[in-house]
Amino acid sequence: MRICVVSYHASPLNPVGAGKSGGMSIVLRNLYCRMTEFAEVDIFVRGNDQTVSLSPGVNVIYVDQNDTTGFAETIIDRHAERQYDLLHTHYWSSGIVGLLVNKTLGIPWLHTLHTVEILKTIKQDRTRVDIEEEIVRACDLVVSPTHQEATALRALYSGVNVISVPHGVNAEMFVPSLDGHKNILYVGRIDPIKGLDVLVDALRILKRDTNLIVVGGPSKGQKNYDAIKTYGRDLSIDFAGPVQHEALVRYYRETAMVVVPSYYESFGLVGLEAMASARPVVGFSHTGLRETVGDDAGILVKMGARNLAQAIKTLLENHELRQKLGNWGRHKALVYDWSNIARRYQVIYEKVVQK
Ligand code: UDP
């Protein structure tokens, strides 16, 4: 099978954790590298014309086009030679390319939104909301990482085909270790939607000399990054900046817990990485963490700094509970190993192609 993947937003080969590169790059890298047994994959991204191999049979094709029309035309040209069986677009900007490609090629089209603008709990972009609706109505199948999101999409857009497949984790890279640390860890792009301000408020409520390590770089501008640094300057917070994905293992090992304070989180890869590392997760119960962390791999609370502070306090004071939640998290994370998730995609892709 030949799969045409579109990632107009960012290349999966870019360093992750700042700017435009976040969880989606990790998803693309991990998922498609595990499909080589049954598929050849071309991932189209923007950049100076060149092709880079991600792994045997998986190419990242850089296209020197900064508008969706030119980008779509390049894909259509490439199809004449490659004869793709399937198109899978990731994120709304790739969905715009999908709309154009679909008009000409008409091959089965899957779309993953990664974040759904209309479901964001802070500040929505109305144009993007409309475009996302057009994309989900035009494609053959929407792939959503949680049941919660899939249900919401079906309710919003009746008649649209939505399937839910979770993202995964590399459970061979993120491994358990003994918990003997007092730090709290945050990992992620520094973007207002990630709720770092709520975590700072929670630490202030805790009034204890807990050390927070913040891994990740500016995503919505340096100003916003500097503002959160200033906001937390009276607390013990160590801003480590973006850390290479493979090097994150040490940060997960050297922490007592991982806090994901996002206002909105479609899935939350960081939660799964913490679970695979046998560290409890603290976050909000309305987010995608509900389906991975649940109530036995960490503490999820209702949105608010006080609730977050209470959950952190509970875990800081109870080493046994941390271990119990961490161990159960590891157990659950194994199910999400990328090799299992890739097999689920194989079944879906084969079904869609055979239709
Ligand atoms: N990440 C990383 N280095 C950093 C910060 C983040 O490798 O400095 C990775 C993190 O391990 C996770 C991803 O970026 O795999 C973030 O994914 P998540 O779903 O938590 O958030 P998103 O970026 O998709 O909003």
Image: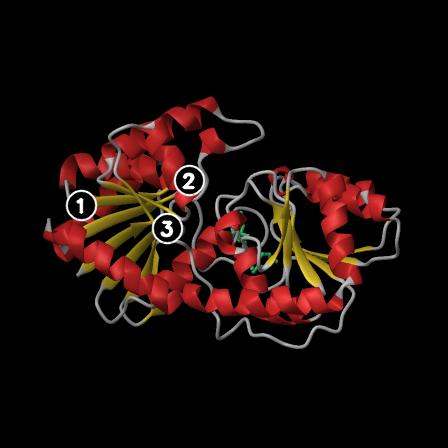
The residue wearing badge 1 is 108
The crowding category of the residue bearing disc 1, from other C-alpha atoms within 10 Å (few below 14, some 14 to 19, many at least 20), is: some
Colour mode of the rendering: secondary structure
Numbered badge on residue 149:
2
**Eyeballing the image, is 186 above or below 121?**
below
Q: In terms of depth relative to the viewer, which is nearer, 243 or 281?
A: 281
Q: Identify the amino acid type marked 3.
A: Val
Q: Nearer the viewer, mark 1 or mark 3?
A: 1
Point 24% across, 32% down: residue: 138
Mark closest to the chain's N terminus, 2 or 3? 3
Q: Amino acid at mark 2?
A: Glu
Q: On the picture, is 180 further left or further right than 3?
A: right
Q: Nearer the viewer, mark 2 or mark 3?
A: 2
| Mark count | 3
Q: Residues within 10 Å of mark 2 (few under 14, many from 20)?
A: many
Q: Earlier in the sequence, mark 2 or mark 1?
A: 1
Q: Which mark is residue 177?
A: none
Which secondary structure lies at badge 1?
loop
Q: x and y percent of residue 193 in the render?
A: 60, 38
Residue at image location 48% in from the left, 75% down from the top = 172
The amino acid type found where label 1 is placed reads: Pro
Is residue 156 rendered to the left or right of residue 42?
right
| x 72%, y 65%: residue | 256
Indicate yes or no: mark 2 CB to ligand 1 under 8 Å.
no
- Within the displayed image, which quadrant is ligand 1 positioned in? bottom right
Mark 2 and mark 3 residues within 8 Å of each other at the beta carbon: no
Q: Nearer the viewer, mark 2 or mark 1?
A: 2
Residue occupied by mark 3: 45
Gap between marks 1 and 3, in whole Å?
A: 20 Å
